[in-house]
């Protein structure tokens, strides 16, 4: 299995900017939605963390367990991921930097940060929030 890998040297050192190991970088909103769907369906912590906003990218396995341990939230996320994976959504620009992906009653809000599209919100909050006691 061959392929090309591109490394770029920046102030922080070398980083992969293109190639097989760069698959988790979302260069477009559509790719971010595909990656989100796969990360949810696979319960992939690294995939979810790669899509989190820069300031929130330190998700822990406990965070993921809490989310998927809540039956209603896990079901809603799985339903959303299935719809996203089969490209059942509509994109629209919101403001100058956000993209909203509407799928059924759900909305995924994406924002370009550090040259990557990140998931900054899932709406409605009444569906995509952990139940509190």
Image (tube, rainbow, N blue to C red):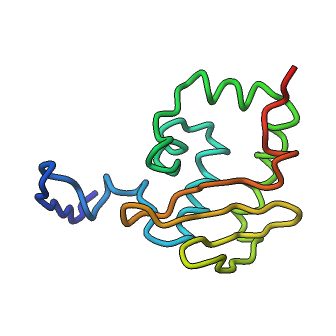
Tally of numbered tags: 0
Residue 49, x across and y down, in percent: 50, 42
Q: Is residue 10 left or right of residue 80?
A: left
Residue ID at (28%, 57%): 1
Tell me the quarter of the image containing the C terminus.
Answer: top right
Residue ID at (59%, 71%): 98
Check the image and report above or below for 89 versus 6. below
Check the image and report above or below for 70 versus 133. below
Residue 114: quadrant of the picture: bottom left
Residue ID at (11%, 58%): 9
Q: Nearer the viewer, residue 131 or 81?
A: 131
Q: Nearer the viewer, residue 106 or 55?
A: 55
Residue 56, x across and y down, in percent: 50, 41
Residue 100: quadrant of the picture: bottom right
Residue 43: quadrant of the picture: top right
Q: Nearer the viewer, residue 86 or 68?
A: 68
Q: Is residue 66 left or right of residue 57?
A: right
Residue 121, x across and y down, in percent: 67, 54
Residue 131, x across and y down, in percent: 85, 29
């Amino acid at each position: 299995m061959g392929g090309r890998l591109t490394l770029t040297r920046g102030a922080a050192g070398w980083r992969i900017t293109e190639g097989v190991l760069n698959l988790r970088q979302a260069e477009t909103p559509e790719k971010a939605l595909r990656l989100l769907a796969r990360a949810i369906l696979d319960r992939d912590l690294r995939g979810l963390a790669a899509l989190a906003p820069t300031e929130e990218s330190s998700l822990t396995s406990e965070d993921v367990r809490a989310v998927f341990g809540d039956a209603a939230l896990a079901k809603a996320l799985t339903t959303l991921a299935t719809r996203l994976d089969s490209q059942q959504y509509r994109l629209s620009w919101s403001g100058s930097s956000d993209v909203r992906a509407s799928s059924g009653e759900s909305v995924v809000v994406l924002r370009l940060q550090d040259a990557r599209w990140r998931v900054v919100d899932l709406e409605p909050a009444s569906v995509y929030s952990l139940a509190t006691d």
